[in-house]
Each structure stands twice: as C-alpha cells, then as structure tokens.
Amino acid sequence: MASVLRKTLSPSIREIRILCCQTSASSLGTRQFVINTYETLKKANPDLPIMIREAKGTPARAFARFERGVERHVSLEGLDEKSVGDKIGELVTNSSTAA
C-alpha cells in the first residue's frame, strides 16, 4: 500500500469512492486492495467518507472529491493491488493542485 494511505489525509479531501466489478479479472487488484487496506485507511481517517461500490461490469476506478466540489479520478483497470494503492495515493496527494 502506498505509504501516504497509512497516514491522515489532507483535510481538503472530502470523500473517496472506489468502484469495481465483483467478478471481473480486471478488478481483482482493486478488490484485493479494498480487502487488505480499507481498515487501515479508515482508522487513519475516521471522519472521511470512503465508499466502495461494486457492480457487475463496472470498470475499476477511484474518485476523490476535494473542497469546492473539485473531483478527480483514476482508472484502476487491470492493476495489481500494489499499483492500485500507488494510483490512489497519487490521486489523494494531488489535493494541493485541486483547489
């Protein structure tokens, strides 16, 4: 997991949404990331909404909503668990350029 996700995230981040398919091989890394990382991420950020949405056929993606309604997303399709963590880490650390 990206080390940034083990710490309290910037207060400018308002929510994180992770979308994936519960059966497709291209979402496997995302599902593994959620299983192995959600608890740690939530403990470090108890007041941050972290939503996991699974739906058949949904491409694996992560969204971060920042203050002032700015929203960014990244594709997680076909990535392994470590790469998913790295991509989400990049997404949430770019908050300084989001506002």
Image (cartoon, grey):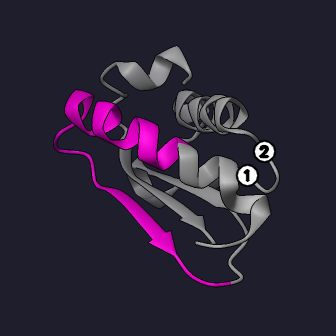
SS label for mark 2:
loop
Q: Which residue is drawn at 65% across and 73% down?
A: 23
Q: Name the residue under label 1.
A: 76
| Image quadrant occupied by the N terminus | top right
Q: Position of residue 61 (x, y in %)?
A: 66, 60
The image position of residue 50, as x and y in percent, is 35, 53
- Could you give the CA–CA distance between mark 2 and mark 1, rounded to whole angstroms? 6 Å
Residue 77 at what x, y percent from top left?
A: 79, 57
| Magenta range | 33-56
Q: Is residue 71 visible?
A: no
Q: What residue type is labelled 2?
A: Leu
Q: Residue 79 carries which label?
A: 2
Q: Quarter of the image holding residue 45?
A: top left
In this picture, residue 96 sits left or right of residue 21: left
Q: Which mark is residue 32?
A: none
Kindly check if marks 2 and 1 are in contact, taking CB atoms under 8 A apart as contact. yes
How many numbered circles are shown?
A: 2
Residue 76 in view (yes/no): yes
Which is more toward the observer, 38 or 14? Answer: 38
Residue placed furthest toward the left: 47
Q: Judge by depth and name the residue closer to the eye, 77 or 69.
A: 77
- Count neighbours of disc 1 (C-alpha within 10 A) and say few if under 14, some if 14 to 19, many if 20 or more: many
Under circle 1, the secondary element is loop
Check disc 2: other Cα within 10 Å, few if <14, some if 14-19, many if 20+.
some
Residue extending furthest toward the bottom = 56
Give the residue type at disc 1.
Leu
Does 53 lie within the magenta span? yes
Tell whether 46 sits left or right of 7.
Answer: left
